[in-house]
Amino acid sequence: MAGCRLVFFFLFLQSGVQKFFFPAEHGLLQGTLSKEEYGTAAGLNQMVFSLFNLFGAGMAVIIYKFFGIYGALVVDSISFAISAILIRSGTFSESARMPNGENSIRDINVTNVLKDFKEGFQYIINFRLLLALVAGFFMLGIVNGGFSVMPFYLLKYKLVPNTYEEVSAVFAAVFGLGMLAGAAFASLLVKKLKYYQMLSGGMLISGAIVVVASFSETVWVFILFMTLLGFVLPSVNVAIGGWLPSIVDRKMMGRVQGWISPLMMLSQSITLGIIAVGFPNFLSIESLFG
C-alpha cells in the first residue's frame, strides 16, 4: 500500500510540473519569435508531438515490461531532466525568460497566487475574443474526456469484443500516423489560412467524422474514419497554438493559462464522470459519439 501511495504521489507531482510547461513555452515563443512565425512554430511542435504520440506508447510498454512502474518513473524523470538541460542551454533574452520582471521565491505565496488568478480572470473577461477561446477550451475538454474512452468502448462493446485489445494497438498506430501526416499538412496550411478558419473548419470536420464513425459496422471502416480524424485534428491544435500567443500579452500568458488548464481538466473530469455513471444503462455507444 505504501508503494501504491508513492506511485500516485509521483504521478500527481508529475502532472503538476507539466502544467508549468505550456505557459513557459508560449512565453518563450512570444519573446523570441515574431507573430508571423507563431503558426510555423506551432506546426513544428505538433509534428514532434505526433511523432512521440506514434512511438511513445510502444516505448512505454517496453520500458514497463522490463523495468516495471518504478523504472518507468525513473525514465520519465530522466527525460524531464534532459528536456530542462536542453531548454536551459538555449540563449533567451531576459525579457523572454522573465516577462514580468525578476521575482524571488518569497514572492510565491497564497496572496500573490490569488492576485494573479484574479488578474487573469479580469483580463479574460474584458477580452471578448479570448473569452470565446477560453469557452472553446472548456468545450474541448469535454471532447477530450469523451474521446479518451469512446473509441475503445466502441471496439469492445460493438465491433470486436473478443479482440479489442489487439485492434486497439492497431488503432493507436494508425491514428498516430494520421496525426503525423496531418501535422505536416497543417504546417503548410497555416501559411494559407487564418487561424480562425483553420480552427472552425477543423472542429466542424472533426465533429462530422466522429458522428459518422459512430455508425461504423466494421472495424476497418471505423479505423479509416479515425485515421481521417487524426489527420484533421492537428489543424485545430496548430491554430490554437499559433493564435493564443498572438493575441495574449506575454506578461499575462501565465495568468491566462492558469485558467485554461483547470477549466479543461474540470470539463474533462465531468465528462468522464457522466460516462462512468451513465454507460451502458443510460448512454449507448452511438449517443457517446453524438
Image (tube, rainbow, N blue to C red):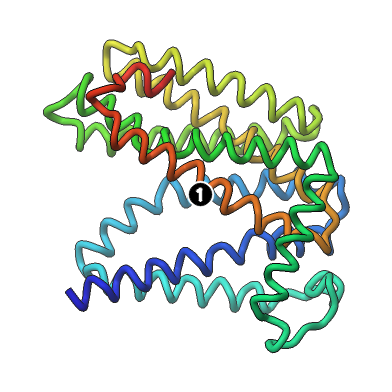
Classify residue 3 by image quadrant.
bottom left
The residue closer to the viewer here, 211 or 270, is 270
Quadrant location of residue 134?
Answer: top right
Q: Residue furthest left?
A: 162
Residue depicted at 27% across the width and 14% down the height: 218
Q: Local crowd at mark 1 within 10 Å, few (<14), some, or many (≥20)?
A: some
Which residue is identified by label 1?
Answer: 265
Instruction: Give how far across and how far down residue 193 sits, in percent.
Output: 79, 27
Left or right: residue 152 versus residue 93 is: left
In the rendering, at what x and y percent does residue 4 appear?
Answer: 22, 71
Residue in the image at 20% along x and 37% along y:
165
* Amino acid identity at mark 1: Met
The image shows residue 125, relative to residue 213, as above or below, that is below
Q: In this rendering, is residue 258 above or below 208?
A: below
Instruction: Name the quarter where the C terminus is drawn.
Output: top left
User: Residue 281, image x and y in percent?
Assistant: 23, 24
Quarter of the image that includes the N terminus? bottom left
Tag 1, which secondary structure? Answer: helix
